[in-house]
Image: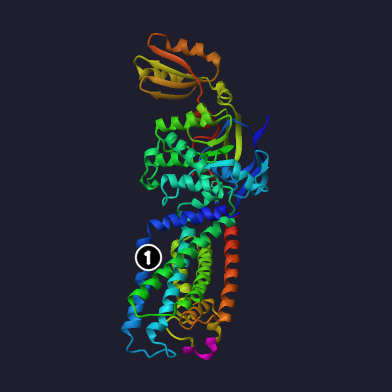
Amino acid sequence: MAFALEIDGLSKVYGTLRAVDAFSLCVAQGTIFGLLGPNGAGKTTLIRMLTTLLRPSAGSARIEGHDILSSARTVRSLIGVVPQDNNLDRYLTCRENLVLHARMYAMAPTEYNRRIDELLELIGLTGRQHDFPDTFSGGMQRRLVVARALVHAPRVLFLDEPTTGLDPQSRRAVWDYVQSLTPQMTIFLTTHYMDEADALCERIVIMDHGRALVDGTAAELKERLAHAHTYELEFRSDGERYEKILRGLPFVRNLQRTGNSFRLALAGEEFLKPLMDRIGGDDIRKICLKEPSLEDVFIELTGREVRE
Amino acid sequence: MFRGAIAIFWRDLLVLRRSLFSELLAVIAYPLTLYLAFGIGLRGYIADVDGVPYALFIAPGLISMTAVSAAFNDSAWSVWFHRRVQRTIEEYRVTPITVYDIVIGKIFSGFAQGTLKGLAVALVIFILTPFRFPPAHLLAYLLFIFLGSMVFSCVGTICGTMIDKPENIGRVEAVVIVPLIFMSGIFFPLSSYPKAAFAAISLLPTTAIFEGARQALLNGKLAPLSIAILLVTAVIAFAAATFTFNRKMSE
Ligand SMILES: Nc1ncnc2c1ncn2[C@@H]1O[C@H](COP(=O)(O)OP(=O)(O)OP(=O)(O)O)[C@@H](O)[C@H]1O
Ligand SMILES: [Mg+2]
């Protein structure tokens, strides 16, 4: 299989902080890859190294076979970048922002004008193309940044939190579009939305403290938590009484109550019967095994506390 | 080759064109005020300088001053703004253009703005005042404006690249740029300096700009020493600006 991206022990050190720590990864061509991780995990730092903005402290990486250090210019001609923070030129109109980008790639006007018309249509900004980005909502600006990264039809697209600040409609529009870009294009994205990674990415890596923690499809990652046996239990009434009972059971873990609904984990599958025996069937409205979500996996791996 | 520099230059001219009228109005106000205050207001108190009426003596310097300070300001603030505020430099840097494209594009737009604004002031002074010069001298004068704007645009680029806090750009301007300009013979002849200072001052590139430009405009003389000093300074400043920018970008 051909790789769009081969990362080999890439590191970035700031003083004593290892923002990215010997990170290695290969991404197959034409796939959508998702990088998840809490704030400060090193996602943006990794993308900045791959897009030739930041010099790695150690390690190497190749994009479509070209080294990011020795062939930086070739690499840049193959990639499109949507940075975490919008960096539009606010003194240029929406369309001029796209035209300037095209000119950097030496595209001919006949070529870029057609392409820009298409992209503006796609992001729904055709009617606003002669307005300045300052007059746009955050979501409209974000869409414009995504469109700008696509003007020159890159082979590998880096998206650093592309849908942050978008409404559900725009998010879905971006997902649909990103999906339609494969398999001609390889997509490398970071996101804090677990549903987004779940719906979009064929492969996910969760990283923290500059290192990869797990790697696999969304289903594979969830599989890792399948041993957790989380159940949802809902009673018709008497929440107080059942809480006391459940708290008294030694094999019940992580009990959470909202009104008459409970969420709990069992120490093992074999405890389901003792549980049912103890609470009886009369008041139960619903009992079900809860599939672990990607978010559960994320929290399990990276801990609960908020990062500084 | 240089298509990135051309694209950036195109962008800067596009933006300048939108606000051309208000920019020119703002840039003309200051030298014109100086001209009226010193050249007209103080006329009766100041004797001719080396046989040249005082108003005539300061006019070329005011034009050169406008050009070089516009070149400095535009480059310094533009590089700073694109680097620190809009972060558009990062957008430029993920495209296949080189760092040299970016810095050369920025230097040339600073240079173009300086030249343009200098010309605007020249035109206004010419229209509103009795200041006259032989048209044949214009070409020699423009050479000094060109070189001067180039030097100051490079110096501005270095400031915009190295300085992160905006107030420090203002400080550099107040402590370095403005004194350099004012001490270099715009308002008084260099012969007013004590002998010892004179030698040092006359080697300053700013002196070469202002003194050389005045000689060129009033007498049609191309002083070889001034041209040589300016050329060398321009080459050094250009190399220093591209080097500084390149190094900053690879941090
Ligand atoms: N220029 C810098 N100097 C020092 N430390 C830095 C610098 N840039 C980033 N860091 C540190 O590197 C670590 C990784 O930052 P990075 O921006 O890559 O995180 P991230 O995963 O993108 O986080 P987020 O989800 O918040 O965007 C952080 O601890 C940050 O403080
Ligand atoms: Mg980030």
Q: Residue A206, located in which quarter of the rendered image?
A: top right
Q: Is residue B64 magenta?
A: no
Please provide percent x and percent y for residue A297. 53, 28
Q: Is residue B251 above or below residue B230?
A: above
Look at the image and tell me whether residue A170 can be seen.
yes
Is most of the magenta stretch helix, strand or loop? helix
| For residue A24, side relative to residue B171 (left or right) | right
Q: Which residues are magenta?
A: B191-198
Please provide percent x and percent y for residue B234. 57, 70
Front position in the image: A80 or B1: B1
Q: Amino acid at mark 1?
A: Leu
Q: Residues within 10 Å of mark 1 (few under 14, many from 20)?
A: some
Residue picked out by circle 1? B24
Q: Secondary structure at mark 1?
A: helix
Q: Residue at x 50, y 29 (%)?
A: A295
Q: Residue at x 43, y 55 (%)?
A: B14
| For residue A227, side relative to residue A245 (left or right) | right
Q: Residue at x 59, y 77 (%)?
A: B228
Color style of the picture: rainbow
Front position in the image: B193 or B188: B188
The chain carrying label 1 is: B
The reply to whether the residue tagged 1 has its Cβ within 8 angstroms of ligand 1 is no
In this rendering, the count of numbered labels is 1
Q: Is residue B220 above or below residue B30?
A: below
Q: Is residue B32 above or below residue A188?
A: below
Q: Is residue B220 above or below residue B241?
A: below
Please provide percent x and percent y for residue B195. 53, 91
Please provide percent x and percent y for residue B99. 58, 55
